[in-house]
Image: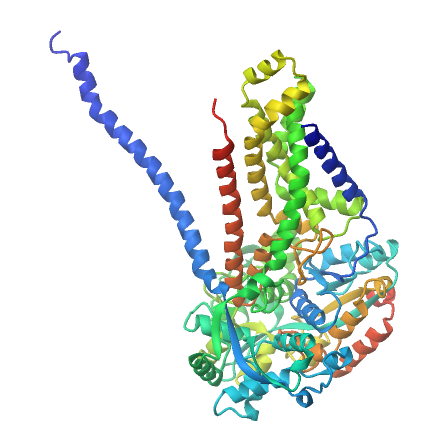
Amino acid sequence: MTDQPSQAELVRQSLKRRYRKERRFRAYGILAIAIALSALVILFADIIGKGYTGFMKTSITMEVNLDGEMMYLDDPTDKRQLKMADFVEPLVQALIREIPGATEEDRDEIRGLINPYASVTLRDALKENPDWLNTTRTMTFLSHTDVDVYVKHAGDAGYSIKLDEQQKAWVDELLERGVIETSFNDVFFSGGDSRDPSKAGILGAIVGSLLTMFVTLILSFPIGVAAAIYLEEFAPQNKFTDFIEVNINNLAAVPSIIFGLLGLAVFINLFGMPRSVPVVGGLVLTLMTLPTIIISSRAAIKSVPPSIREAAEGIGASKMQVVLHHVLPLAMPGMLTGSIIGMAQALGETAPLLLIGMVAFIVDVPDGFFDSATVLPVQVFLWAGSPELAFIERASAAIMVLLAFLISMNALAIWMRKRLERRW
Amino acid sequence: MIKLNKALATVALAGSVAAMSVPAMARDTISIVGSSTVYPFATVVAERFGTKTDYNTPKLESTGSGGGMKLFCQGIGTQHPDITNASRRMKASEYELCQKNGVTDITEFRIGSDGIVIASSKDAENLDITLKQLFLALGSKVPVDGEWVANPNKNWSDVDSSLPNKPILVMGPPPTSGTRDSFNELALAAGCDELPEAASLGEDEHGAICESVREDGAFIEAGENDNLIVQKLIGDKDMYGVFGYSFLEENSDRLQAATLNGMVPTAEGIAADQYPVARSLFFYVKKAHVGVIPGIQEYVDEFTSNAAMGQNGYLKNVGLIVPPREQLMNLMDKAENMPNLALEELK
């Protein structure tokens, strides 16, 4: 009997093993977080590493002689003359003067350093300031994308440099003299899409995203909240409401492209709404976000303690007063959090927009809900598929902008929850 | 809180009213759909058109040729596109769909071609090969005694004794490239279809077998940079390369093109669709929209102008095989008169 270890002895013996088990369990948790974090770090490092150069532009600053005779222009307010005028020649001449040793014979190579749309910049400047004609001005133009790639990525095996040796020598020299400079890429934030990477911007996509999100929010939030209130507070508990509940939960898991098909069939084909417009995009994304908002709103309403309702009813409030005066304000933080998360999801969607024509090459920045538009993730998709290597950094830069939007939306959701949440 | 209630009702109402009141809205931007092969050319034209003129820049969706036709032929009205691009000709069935939906007057523009060549260094032994032999050399699976097996051919001469007794070594574009798609479809699949064994393949199998390139090192993916392929070819006499016709032309002093099905690639042969790995590119204009949607006529003029499609045009710089000058003149006439496409032309 005495050779049997006592109870306390048994516990002591197993203690070591139990501690070890616990340590292991904690280590698994840390490992899981480490894996998730390192995936995130790799993703961010890759995107930032590829994309930070997208926030830089390469431009040429030079003295341009705006000689009317050279441009075949004597009245910049005359539309017809503007159409027929030659805005390339002054740029080429100006750059030839900047490069010592360059002559008229090098004009084709020199023209290859200037952005093809620089002549448009010059035309618009003259249109705006007709008195600049026949003067000499110091002006800044975008460089050709080949120059941009050379300046940013010379020696990078992932990029091919299209300049020839002569052009490279010129660019090196001009860089040293400060004629060619890299600076913050304001074009990227102030322009629409373009097939020329140097000129491409995301303003059009940002505005498109904002318009689409506005439509989504203004439709999905009230409808979602109203549905949640009815289902939680007023609807009888029966087979039919159970059926509705199951269906709402199912809808939350339906692949988003299905909503795009629905939008195409209903809004465009049946109602005859135009393709590629933020209103239709917003409607489709509303359908997609609704289940998320309804589910989170119902959870928020459920978390309001019944004692609040009973107290209100006890002092004679009607059902509607109970809901509007007490339940809704208390549930609002949860509802808003759910909505913001639903909106963040919608902001990152491309698949449903493909079918309603929002995946398109659109240059003009949209200025209304019925103007053709794309959204940020679509812009990333389009650039990532472009053959020009210079679009890689633009796509990564656009991803960073999109991530900044998403992070700030999620931060807003957390802040609101912290700030408005009430604990019982 | 009653205010909130009212606000909710107003918003819901406003939403539904907005949704209902849209039909027949005016549109002042040209809407273009269609082929992803034409997309890189058409977008450049659209952007130039937008900056040159006071019209809005046209909106372009890359839907594929078939998808574009379907949208285009859906009817007349601002909610339907004005122009569709295609990397093949309109089918008679699509034409009939158009007619059925009231899209009766269509003008066709053949805007140039897309040709793919197999080339090698001038010092190397030139290939004179049929598409069938090409598939047997480069397909991932080939039939041996009625069974589809991993490609066993190591030397060109294993495929056919008339071919050089040298290892099969071909550099080409990666699968992300449109050139590769066309090569798979127009060269390999066409060669595969000449094999009696291909007839019994199902549709899925046909795609998987006939349009896939071997991955055992005989075919080297070179990245999107065609210049790199050109350099490699000049350095390595055993190597053959696959790329767009324009690169052959630019390096014609150093490279020679393989003869495919007896045809040497020439700009004329490609433009005339005689060279086997070439296809014409088209766009179709809905005439009922010309004059209704502002700028269609001007867009077509820009596309068919010498500045765009001439021998020094900007479309040539982005890789289009531009039509010969007489054809371009015909296109300009066409842009002016906009003749109707007839069903007989498509049969």
Residue at figure coordinates x 63%, y 54% from the top left? A207
Query: Residue B73: x percent and y percent?
Result: 81, 56
Residue at figure coordinates x 55%, y 22% from the top left? A304
Q: Residue furthest top?
A: A1
The colouring scheme, among rainbow, by chain, secondary structure or one colour, is rainbow
Q: Place residue B21 in its image quadrant.
A: top right
Q: Does B205 sit left or right of B97 as displayed?
A: left
Query: Residue B162: x percent and y percent?
Result: 55, 76
Q: Quadrant of the N terminus of chain A?
A: top left
Query: Quick one: A130 or B309, which is closer to the camera?
Result: A130
Q: Is residue B173 above or below residue A101?
A: above
Q: Is residue B260 visible?
A: no
Q: Is residue A59 visible?
A: yes
Q: Is residue A362 above or below residue A269?
A: below
Query: Residue A390: x percent and y percent?
Result: 52, 67
Query: Residue B276: x percent and y percent?
Result: 67, 71
Q: Is residue A39 above or below residue B162?
A: above
Disc tally is 0
Q: Is residue A160 above or below residue B329?
A: above
Q: Place residue B134 in its image quadrant.
A: bottom right
Q: Residue furthest left?
A: A2
Q: Does B145 sit left or right of A134 as displayed?
A: left
Query: Quick one: A109 or A189, which is closer to the camera?
Result: A189
Query: Quick one: A127 or A34, which is closer to the camera?
Result: A127
Q: Place residue B119 in its image quadrant.
A: bottom right
